[in-house]
Amino acid sequence: MRNIFSKRQFLANLPYAYLCVIWYIDADQSYHIVKRPGIMESDYIAVRTISGCGILTEYNGEKHELKANSLGIFCSGDVAQYKASLEGWQFYWFRFNHSDWREKCNWVEELNITASELKNMERCFSNLNSKFINECLNAEALFNFLLSDWMIRLHSGTSAQLSASELTAILEKGCYQQLDLKTLAKTAGMCERSFRDAVHRVTGMSPKEYMSKLKMDAAMDLLLTTTKSVSEIAEEMGYETPFYFSRAFKKHYGISPKKVRNGIFGK
């Protein structure tokens, strides 16, 4: 005979999301919502795009593209307007309060929608609209599960499995092949947010900053060891014009590439 039990050790209040309302929208290109300015809102919005694409704009003018399989979390008071693209926009829009929200807001990440997740969102939507309290509570519990699952999946990635040398090798490849952040994160087996966090832990810089440093170091080496012109080096580093290259180089080193070249080869 076995008689065992598991006892809860902590009775502290846990962070909890209070689900206010859910919209399920399957919109065509005419869908365009503009919020009235000056409305004070302290709650949050989670947007889960199933298909199509939408553009969400903050009051500060920053735009976010919400493609299929994307998750966006925003402060409701920061959202100025949102509209569907030409291909339409099918999405769930969750509005919620949270007792202890510590995540950053106003971001969008790619996170594949699973079949079970889609079913849970459908159940969450139908149960919240029920006149029975137990079904409403079930909807709220489902949303808290969804929210926790999203955060765990975003933060899990595979950063612990990649060494510093492996991460920097991916960045070097991205630098010389001019790969975007999405492609680099996919190469590392992470979502974009986890990849940015992993790179920052290893290098102290964002992926963009680190790749810019790699380019500048390579450019300096070419200036010091070859007779290639500044224009040739700019093109090799992936800059549209020598002007943009020279400006970036001077910002990084405090001296123009022309002066470096003249100092070495102008004697």
Image (cartoon, rainbow, N blue to C red):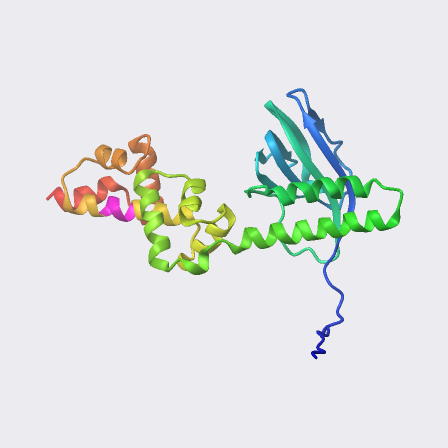
Instruction: Give the answer, above or below, for where 186 lies relative to 56.
Output: below
Count of number-bearing discs:
0
Instruction: Give the answer, above or below, for where 201 lies relative to 57.
Output: below
Is 218 colored magenta in this rendering?
A: yes
Residue 193 in the image, given as x and y percentages of width and height: 51, 49
Quadrant of the snapshot with the N terminus: bottom right
Residue 253 in the image, given as x and y percentages of width and height: 31, 49
Residue drawn at the location 49% of the way across and 46% of the way down: 192
Front one among 43 and 2:
2
Mark yes or no: residue 254 visible: no
Front one among 255 and 42:
42
**Res. 261 image quadrant:** top left
Mark yes or no: residue 193 visible: yes
Residue drawn at the location 58% of the way across and 39% of the way down: 70
Residue 96 in the image, given as x and y percentages of width and height: 75, 46
Residue drawn at the location 40% of the way across and 46% of the way down: 187
- Magenta stretch? 216-220
Is 186 colored magenta in this rendering?
A: no
Residue drawn at the location 41% of the way across and 39% of the way down: 180
Front one among 159 and 78:
159
Q: Main secondary structure of the magenta part?
A: helix
Q: Is residue 242 left or right of residue 179?
A: left
Residue 230 in the image, given as x and y percentages of width and height: 22, 36
Q: Is residue 149 left or right of residue 133?
A: left
Quadrant of the snapshot with the C terminus: top left
